[in-house]
Amino acid sequence: MHRRARLVALLLLAFGVTSSPDLVTPAVAGSREDECQDLSRRAVTLLGEAERASDARKAIEAATMLERAMRLCPENLELPFQRALALCVARDEDAARAALRSLDEQLVARGTDPEKDPRSLYVRALVHFTFGNNAAACLDVLRVLEARAPQFLPAAVANLRFRAHLDYANQLAFGRAFHDAIKHAQLAVEIARGNERRTDLARRNLGQIYRMADRWIESQAEFEDLVRKYPQDAVLRYALASVLADQLKFEEACAQWTEVLRLRTLPGSVDPREADQLADAPLRYGVSLVHALRVPDGLGRIRAYVKENPSDVRGWVHLGVTLLDNADPSDPAGAAEALEKALTLDPMCERTLRRLVEIYTGPKPDAARAKELQAILDDPKAKARREAEMDRRKKVRPDRTTGCE
Protein backbone atom coordinates (compact mmCIF):
# COMPACT_ATOMS: atom_id res chain seq x y z
CA MET A 1 0.00 0.00 0.00
CA HIS A 2 1.34 3.47 -0.80
CA ARG A 3 2.41 5.52 2.21
CA ARG A 4 -0.34 8.08 1.61
CA ALA A 5 -3.05 5.42 1.50
CA ARG A 6 -1.65 3.85 4.65
CA LEU A 7 -1.75 7.22 6.37
CA VAL A 8 -5.36 7.83 5.52
CA ALA A 9 -6.26 4.43 6.90
CA LEU A 10 -4.55 5.46 10.13
CA LEU A 11 -6.24 8.81 10.18
CA LEU A 12 -9.75 7.57 9.51
CA LEU A 13 -9.32 5.40 12.56
CA ALA A 14 -8.11 8.43 14.45
CA PHE A 15 -11.18 10.36 13.34
CA GLY A 16 -13.24 7.67 14.97
CA VAL A 17 -14.86 6.10 11.91
CA THR A 18 -14.50 2.72 13.59
CA SER A 19 -13.85 3.45 17.22
CA SER A 20 -14.62 6.98 18.38
CA PRO A 21 -17.72 8.71 16.95
CA ASP A 22 -17.17 11.68 19.28
CA LEU A 23 -14.29 12.83 17.09
CA VAL A 24 -16.52 12.97 14.04
CA THR A 25 -19.49 14.65 15.66
CA PRO A 26 -18.38 16.87 18.54
CA ALA A 27 -20.90 17.08 21.35
CA VAL A 28 -22.24 20.60 20.73
CA ALA A 29 -25.65 22.16 20.20
CA GLY A 30 -27.19 25.05 18.23
CA SER A 31 -26.95 26.23 14.64
CA ARG A 32 -23.23 27.02 14.72
CA GLU A 33 -22.48 23.77 16.37
CA ASP A 34 -24.67 21.93 13.87
CA GLU A 35 -22.65 23.48 11.06
CA CYS A 36 -19.42 22.42 12.77
CA GLN A 37 -20.76 18.90 13.01
CA ASP A 38 -21.71 18.90 9.34
CA LEU A 39 -18.31 20.21 8.28
CA SER A 40 -16.58 17.55 10.34
CA ARG A 41 -18.65 14.79 8.77
CA ARG A 42 -18.01 16.07 5.27
CA ALA A 43 -14.30 16.31 5.99
CA VAL A 44 -14.19 12.65 7.01
CA THR A 45 -16.03 11.69 3.82
CA LEU A 46 -13.49 13.59 1.77
CA LEU A 47 -10.65 11.85 3.57
CA GLY A 48 -12.19 8.51 2.66
CA GLU A 49 -12.17 9.59 -0.97
CA ALA A 50 -8.60 10.81 -0.61
CA GLU A 51 -7.63 7.37 0.65
CA ARG A 52 -9.15 5.59 -2.31
CA ALA A 53 -7.69 7.97 -4.91
CA SER A 54 -4.49 9.10 -3.13
CA ASP A 55 -5.84 12.59 -3.68
CA ALA A 56 -4.01 15.25 -1.65
CA ARG A 57 -6.33 17.92 -3.03
CA LYS A 58 -9.33 16.37 -1.29
CA ALA A 59 -7.41 16.06 1.96
CA ILE A 60 -6.54 19.77 1.76
CA GLU A 61 -10.19 20.55 1.08
CA ALA A 62 -11.08 18.60 4.22
CA ALA A 63 -8.54 20.61 6.20
CA THR A 64 -10.10 23.82 4.86
CA MET A 65 -13.54 22.68 6.02
CA LEU A 66 -12.17 21.96 9.46
CA GLU A 67 -10.49 25.38 9.59
CA ARG A 68 -13.88 26.95 8.94
CA ALA A 69 -15.43 24.79 11.65
CA MET A 70 -12.71 25.94 14.06
CA ARG A 71 -13.69 29.56 13.48
CA LEU A 72 -17.32 28.72 14.17
CA CYS A 73 -16.60 26.58 17.23
CA PRO A 74 -13.26 27.81 18.67
CA GLU A 75 -13.79 25.95 21.94
CA ASN A 76 -13.91 22.51 20.38
CA LEU A 77 -10.41 21.03 20.50
CA GLU A 78 -11.34 18.01 18.41
CA LEU A 79 -11.52 20.21 15.31
CA PRO A 80 -7.87 21.41 15.32
CA PHE A 81 -6.89 17.83 16.13
CA GLN A 82 -8.77 16.59 13.07
CA ARG A 83 -7.32 19.36 10.93
CA ALA A 84 -3.77 18.43 11.89
CA LEU A 85 -4.48 14.84 10.89
CA ALA A 86 -6.01 15.93 7.57
CA LEU A 87 -2.86 17.87 6.74
CA CYS A 88 -0.81 14.76 7.39
CA VAL A 89 -2.98 12.94 4.85
CA ALA A 90 -2.34 15.80 2.43
CA ARG A 91 1.40 15.35 3.07
CA ASP A 92 1.79 19.09 3.64
CA GLU A 93 4.61 18.96 6.15
CA ASP A 94 4.87 22.66 6.95
CA ALA A 95 1.12 23.01 7.41
CA ALA A 96 0.89 19.83 9.49
CA ARG A 97 3.68 20.93 11.82
CA ALA A 98 2.09 24.39 12.10
CA ALA A 99 -1.26 22.77 12.92
CA LEU A 100 0.39 20.73 15.66
CA ARG A 101 1.94 23.87 17.13
CA SER A 102 -1.45 25.59 16.99
CA LEU A 103 -3.10 22.64 18.75
CA ASP A 104 -0.43 22.74 21.45
CA GLU A 105 -0.90 26.48 21.93
CA GLN A 106 -4.65 26.02 22.40
CA LEU A 107 -4.03 23.27 24.92
CA VAL A 108 -1.61 25.45 26.88
CA ALA A 109 -4.11 28.33 26.81
CA ARG A 110 -6.56 26.02 28.56
CA GLY A 111 -4.09 24.86 31.13
CA THR A 112 -3.30 21.49 29.54
CA ASP A 113 0.24 20.26 29.04
CA PRO A 114 0.60 19.09 25.40
CA GLU A 115 3.11 16.48 26.56
CA LYS A 116 0.26 14.86 28.49
CA ASP A 117 -2.59 15.34 26.03
CA PRO A 118 -3.27 12.24 23.91
CA ARG A 119 -4.38 14.28 20.88
CA SER A 120 -1.13 16.20 20.74
CA LEU A 121 0.90 13.06 21.37
CA TYR A 122 -0.87 11.16 18.62
CA VAL A 123 -0.34 13.92 16.04
CA ARG A 124 3.30 14.25 17.11
CA ALA A 125 3.85 10.51 16.61
CA LEU A 126 2.16 10.67 13.23
CA VAL A 127 4.28 13.64 12.13
CA HIS A 128 7.44 11.75 13.09
CA PHE A 129 6.25 8.76 11.06
CA THR A 130 4.99 10.69 8.05
CA PHE A 131 7.52 13.44 7.57
CA GLY A 132 10.53 12.66 9.70
CA ASN A 133 11.08 9.10 8.49
CA ASN A 134 11.66 8.53 12.17
CA ALA A 135 9.83 5.41 13.24
CA ALA A 136 11.91 5.23 16.43
CA ALA A 137 10.73 8.66 17.58
CA CYS A 138 7.16 7.72 16.63
CA LEU A 139 7.36 4.64 18.85
CA ASP A 140 8.82 6.67 21.73
CA VAL A 141 5.87 9.07 21.61
CA LEU A 142 3.36 6.24 21.32
CA ARG A 143 4.79 4.65 24.47
CA VAL A 144 4.12 7.89 26.37
CA LEU A 145 0.64 8.13 24.87
CA GLU A 146 -0.31 4.58 25.79
CA ALA A 147 0.99 5.00 29.32
CA ARG A 148 -1.01 8.19 29.87
CA ALA A 149 -4.19 7.38 27.94
CA PRO A 150 -4.41 3.65 27.20
CA GLN A 151 -8.01 3.96 25.96
CA PHE A 152 -7.31 6.75 23.46
CA LEU A 153 -8.23 5.56 19.96
CA PRO A 154 -6.79 2.10 20.61
CA ALA A 155 -7.32 0.86 17.06
CA ALA A 156 -5.65 3.89 15.50
CA VAL A 157 -2.75 3.79 17.95
CA ALA A 158 -2.23 0.07 17.37
CA ASN A 159 -2.31 0.64 13.62
CA LEU A 160 0.32 3.37 13.81
CA ARG A 161 2.45 1.27 16.17
CA PHE A 162 2.28 -1.66 13.74
CA ARG A 163 3.50 0.49 10.84
CA ALA A 164 6.20 2.09 12.92
CA HIS A 165 7.57 -1.25 14.14
CA LEU A 166 7.62 -2.53 10.57
CA ASP A 167 9.33 0.57 9.18
CA TYR A 168 11.84 0.63 12.01
CA ALA A 169 12.59 -3.08 11.50
CA ASN A 170 13.47 -2.43 7.88
CA GLN A 171 15.57 0.62 8.72
CA LEU A 172 17.53 -1.42 11.25
CA ALA A 173 17.95 -4.29 8.80
CA PHE A 174 19.36 -2.00 6.14
CA GLY A 175 21.78 -0.75 8.78
CA ARG A 176 22.66 -4.40 9.48
CA ALA A 177 21.38 -4.21 13.06
CA PHE A 178 19.67 -7.53 12.52
CA HIS A 179 19.00 -8.54 16.14
CA ASP A 180 16.91 -5.42 16.81
CA ALA A 181 15.41 -5.50 13.31
CA ILE A 182 14.06 -9.01 13.89
CA LYS A 183 12.72 -7.98 17.31
CA HIS A 184 10.72 -5.10 15.83
CA ALA A 185 9.42 -7.22 12.95
CA GLN A 186 8.28 -9.83 15.46
CA LEU A 187 6.53 -7.09 17.48
CA ALA A 188 4.70 -6.05 14.31
CA VAL A 189 3.56 -9.66 13.85
CA GLU A 190 2.29 -9.76 17.43
CA ILE A 191 0.43 -6.45 17.14
CA ALA A 192 -1.24 -7.66 13.94
CA ARG A 193 -2.62 -10.86 15.47
CA GLY A 194 -6.28 -11.12 14.56
CA ASN A 195 -5.79 -9.20 11.31
CA GLU A 196 -4.71 -11.78 8.75
CA ARG A 197 -3.66 -9.30 6.07
CA ARG A 198 -1.44 -7.33 8.42
CA THR A 199 -0.01 -10.45 10.04
CA ASP A 200 1.04 -11.80 6.66
CA LEU A 201 2.51 -8.45 5.64
CA ALA A 202 4.63 -8.44 8.80
CA ARG A 203 5.69 -12.05 8.27
CA ARG A 204 6.72 -11.21 4.73
CA ASN A 205 9.00 -8.49 6.08
CA LEU A 206 10.25 -10.77 8.84
CA GLY A 207 11.14 -13.46 6.31
CA GLN A 208 13.15 -10.99 4.26
CA ILE A 209 14.99 -9.68 7.33
CA TYR A 210 15.83 -13.25 8.37
CA ARG A 211 17.31 -13.71 4.91
CA MET A 212 19.35 -10.50 5.13
CA ALA A 213 20.67 -11.75 8.47
CA ASP A 214 21.67 -15.10 6.86
CA ARG A 215 19.12 -16.89 9.02
CA TRP A 216 18.06 -18.83 5.98
CA ILE A 217 16.20 -21.70 7.65
CA GLU A 218 13.87 -19.30 9.45
CA SER A 219 13.44 -17.22 6.30
CA GLN A 220 12.62 -20.32 4.28
CA ALA A 221 10.03 -21.40 6.85
CA GLU A 222 8.25 -18.03 6.68
CA PHE A 223 8.16 -17.92 2.90
CA GLU A 224 7.16 -21.57 2.49
CA ASP A 225 4.18 -21.00 4.76
CA LEU A 226 3.20 -17.82 2.95
CA VAL A 227 3.54 -19.47 -0.47
CA ARG A 228 1.25 -22.28 0.65
CA LYS A 229 -1.24 -19.62 1.66
CA TYR A 230 -0.81 -17.43 -1.43
CA PRO A 231 0.33 -19.79 -4.22
CA GLN A 232 -0.34 -17.20 -6.93
CA ASP A 233 1.91 -14.53 -5.37
CA ALA A 234 4.96 -14.27 -7.63
CA VAL A 235 6.86 -11.98 -5.27
CA LEU A 236 6.59 -14.47 -2.42
CA ARG A 237 7.82 -17.25 -4.69
CA TYR A 238 10.72 -15.03 -5.79
CA ALA A 239 11.68 -14.62 -2.13
CA LEU A 240 11.41 -18.35 -1.49
CA ALA A 241 13.49 -19.19 -4.59
CA SER A 242 16.14 -16.73 -3.47
CA VAL A 243 16.52 -18.13 0.03
CA LEU A 244 16.61 -21.69 -1.35
CA ALA A 245 19.44 -20.62 -3.67
CA ASP A 246 21.22 -19.02 -0.71
CA GLN A 247 21.34 -22.52 0.81
CA LEU A 248 22.54 -24.12 -2.45
CA LYS A 249 19.19 -25.90 -2.84
CA PHE A 250 19.24 -25.16 -6.53
CA GLU A 251 16.81 -27.81 -7.79
CA GLU A 252 14.20 -26.60 -5.31
CA ALA A 253 14.98 -23.01 -6.25
CA CYS A 254 14.51 -23.82 -9.95
CA ALA A 255 11.04 -25.18 -9.25
CA GLN A 256 10.11 -21.86 -7.62
CA TRP A 257 11.72 -19.77 -10.38
CA THR A 258 9.62 -21.67 -12.92
CA GLU A 259 6.50 -20.61 -11.07
CA VAL A 260 7.71 -17.02 -10.77
CA LEU A 261 8.19 -16.82 -14.52
CA ARG A 262 4.78 -18.36 -15.16
CA LEU A 263 2.96 -16.10 -12.73
CA ARG A 264 4.58 -12.87 -13.87
CA THR A 265 3.04 -13.33 -17.32
CA LEU A 266 -0.52 -13.70 -16.04
CA PRO A 267 -2.59 -10.48 -16.35
CA GLY A 268 -3.29 -8.97 -12.97
CA SER A 269 -1.18 -11.46 -11.04
CA VAL A 270 1.51 -8.96 -10.03
CA ASP A 271 0.96 -5.62 -8.32
CA PRO A 272 2.49 -3.02 -10.72
CA ARG A 273 4.30 -1.50 -7.74
CA GLU A 274 6.11 -4.81 -7.21
CA ALA A 275 6.74 -5.76 -10.83
CA ASP A 276 10.28 -4.38 -10.82
CA GLN A 277 11.17 -6.85 -8.06
CA LEU A 278 10.69 -9.67 -10.56
CA ALA A 279 12.58 -8.17 -13.49
CA ASP A 280 15.74 -10.24 -12.98
CA ALA A 281 13.92 -13.52 -12.33
CA PRO A 282 14.94 -14.97 -15.74
CA LEU A 283 18.59 -14.32 -14.89
CA ARG A 284 18.24 -15.82 -11.41
CA TYR A 285 16.59 -18.87 -12.91
CA GLY A 286 19.39 -19.29 -15.42
CA VAL A 287 22.05 -19.04 -12.71
CA SER A 288 20.23 -21.58 -10.55
CA LEU A 289 20.03 -23.96 -13.50
CA VAL A 290 23.79 -23.67 -13.98
CA HIS A 291 24.42 -24.47 -10.33
CA ALA A 292 21.97 -27.36 -10.55
CA LEU A 293 24.33 -28.74 -13.25
CA ARG A 294 21.82 -28.06 -16.01
CA VAL A 295 24.42 -25.87 -17.68
CA PRO A 296 23.28 -25.73 -21.32
CA ASP A 297 19.74 -24.70 -20.34
CA GLY A 298 21.03 -22.22 -17.77
CA LEU A 299 23.58 -20.72 -20.15
CA GLY A 300 20.91 -20.32 -22.80
CA ARG A 301 18.68 -18.44 -20.38
CA ILE A 302 21.52 -16.19 -19.26
CA ARG A 303 22.33 -15.38 -22.90
CA ALA A 304 18.67 -14.59 -23.55
CA TYR A 305 18.60 -12.29 -20.52
CA VAL A 306 21.73 -10.45 -21.69
CA LYS A 307 20.20 -10.00 -25.14
CA GLU A 308 17.03 -8.49 -23.65
CA ASN A 309 18.86 -6.49 -20.95
CA PRO A 310 22.22 -5.46 -22.44
CA SER A 311 22.69 -2.63 -19.96
CA ASP A 312 22.38 -4.87 -16.86
CA VAL A 313 25.93 -5.56 -15.73
CA ARG A 314 24.82 -8.60 -13.74
CA GLY A 315 23.88 -10.53 -16.86
CA TRP A 316 27.32 -10.01 -18.38
CA VAL A 317 29.04 -10.99 -15.13
CA HIS A 318 27.09 -14.24 -14.86
CA LEU A 319 27.63 -14.97 -18.53
CA GLY A 320 31.38 -14.52 -18.17
CA VAL A 321 31.66 -16.57 -15.01
CA THR A 322 29.55 -19.36 -16.48
CA LEU A 323 31.60 -19.51 -19.67
CA LEU A 324 34.79 -19.69 -17.62
CA ASP A 325 33.78 -22.01 -14.79
CA ASN A 326 30.92 -24.13 -16.03
CA ALA A 327 30.85 -24.33 -19.82
CA ASP A 328 32.04 -27.56 -21.39
CA PRO A 329 34.40 -26.84 -22.95
CA SER A 330 35.48 -23.75 -21.04
CA ASP A 331 35.40 -20.58 -23.13
CA PRO A 332 37.94 -18.11 -21.68
CA ALA A 333 37.75 -15.87 -24.73
CA GLY A 334 33.97 -15.58 -24.46
CA ALA A 335 34.28 -15.10 -20.72
CA ALA A 336 36.81 -12.29 -21.18
CA GLU A 337 34.56 -10.58 -23.72
CA ALA A 338 31.54 -10.76 -21.41
CA LEU A 339 33.46 -9.56 -18.36
CA GLU A 340 35.09 -6.72 -20.30
CA LYS A 341 31.57 -5.64 -21.29
CA ALA A 342 30.57 -5.80 -17.62
CA LEU A 343 33.59 -3.71 -16.65
CA THR A 344 32.70 -1.10 -19.27
CA LEU A 345 29.16 -0.88 -17.90
CA ASP A 346 30.30 -0.71 -14.28
CA PRO A 347 34.03 -0.21 -13.57
CA MET A 348 33.41 -0.23 -9.80
CA CYS A 349 32.69 -3.95 -9.43
CA GLU A 350 35.71 -5.64 -7.85
CA ARG A 351 34.64 -9.17 -8.71
CA THR A 352 34.73 -8.32 -12.41
CA LEU A 353 38.26 -6.95 -12.09
CA ARG A 354 39.50 -10.00 -10.23
CA ARG A 355 37.99 -12.51 -12.66
CA LEU A 356 39.51 -10.67 -15.61
CA VAL A 357 42.95 -10.73 -13.97
CA GLU A 358 42.44 -14.45 -13.43
CA ILE A 359 41.66 -14.96 -17.13
CA TYR A 360 44.54 -12.84 -18.40
CA THR A 361 47.09 -14.53 -16.14
CA GLY A 362 45.76 -18.01 -16.94
CA PRO A 363 43.62 -19.46 -19.72
CA LYS A 364 43.80 -16.40 -22.03
CA PRO A 365 47.20 -14.80 -21.32
CA ASP A 366 47.51 -11.04 -21.75
CA ALA A 367 50.25 -9.74 -19.45
CA ALA A 368 49.74 -6.07 -20.27
CA ARG A 369 45.99 -6.12 -19.60
CA ALA A 370 46.46 -8.18 -16.46
CA LYS A 371 49.01 -5.68 -15.16
CA GLU A 372 46.70 -2.76 -15.93
CA LEU A 373 43.77 -4.31 -14.10
CA GLN A 374 45.87 -5.45 -11.15
CA ALA A 375 47.13 -1.89 -10.73
CA ILE A 376 43.52 -0.73 -10.41
CA LEU A 377 42.88 -3.39 -7.78
CA ASP A 378 46.02 -2.45 -5.84
CA ASP A 379 45.55 1.32 -5.90
CA PRO A 380 44.51 2.32 -2.32
CA LYS A 381 42.49 5.34 -3.51
CA ALA A 382 40.65 3.32 -6.14
CA LYS A 383 39.94 0.60 -3.58
CA ALA A 384 38.54 3.17 -1.13
CA ARG A 385 36.32 4.61 -3.86
CA ARG A 386 34.99 1.15 -4.71
CA GLU A 387 34.23 0.33 -1.09
CA ALA A 388 32.46 3.66 -0.56
CA GLU A 389 30.42 3.14 -3.72
CA MET A 390 29.39 -0.37 -2.72
CA ASP A 391 28.29 0.88 0.71
CA ARG A 392 26.29 3.64 -0.95
CA ARG A 393 24.55 1.25 -3.31
CA LYS A 394 23.53 -1.07 -0.51
CA LYS A 395 21.79 1.87 1.13
CA VAL A 396 20.01 3.28 -1.91
CA ARG A 397 19.27 0.35 -4.22
CA PRO A 398 15.79 -1.14 -3.75
CA ASP A 399 17.28 -4.66 -3.50
CA ARG A 400 19.99 -3.42 -1.09
CA THR A 401 22.74 -5.09 -3.10
CA THR A 402 25.82 -3.75 -4.89
CA GLY A 403 24.28 -4.44 -8.29
CA CYS A 404 27.41 -6.32 -9.34
CA GLU A 405 26.13 -9.89 -9.15
Image: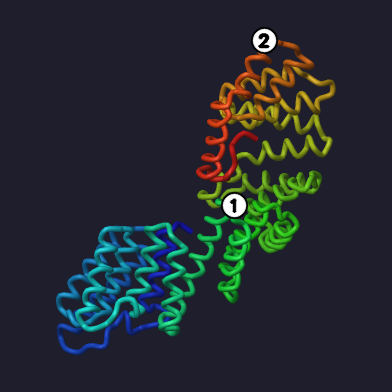
At a point 63% along the width and 15% down the height, the residue shown is 372
Q: In the rendered image of this protein, does residue 65 appear above or below residue 148?
A: above
Location of residue 383 in the rendering, given as x and y in whole percent from the top left corner: 58, 29
Q: Which mark is residue 368?
A: 2
Q: Is residue 346 visible?
A: no
Location of residue 151 in the rendering, given as x and y in whole percent from the top left corner: 43, 85
Of residues 5 and 346, the one nearer the viewer is 346
Residue neighbourhood size for the residue with mark 2, other residues' Cα within 10 Å, grouped as few (<14), some (14–19), many (≥20) = few
At a point 45% along the width and 83% down the height, the residue shown is 150
Q: In the rendered image of this protein, does residue 276 appear above or below residue 318?
A: below
Q: Which residue is mark 1?
A: 176
Quadrant of image for the C terminus: top right
Of residues 255 and 357, the one nearer the viewer is 357
> From the viewer's perspective, is 72 left or right of 212?
left
Q: In the rendered image of this protein, does residue 241 appear above or below residue 380?
A: below
In the image, farthest residue toward the front:
380
At a point 63% along the width and 23% down the height, the residue shown is 378
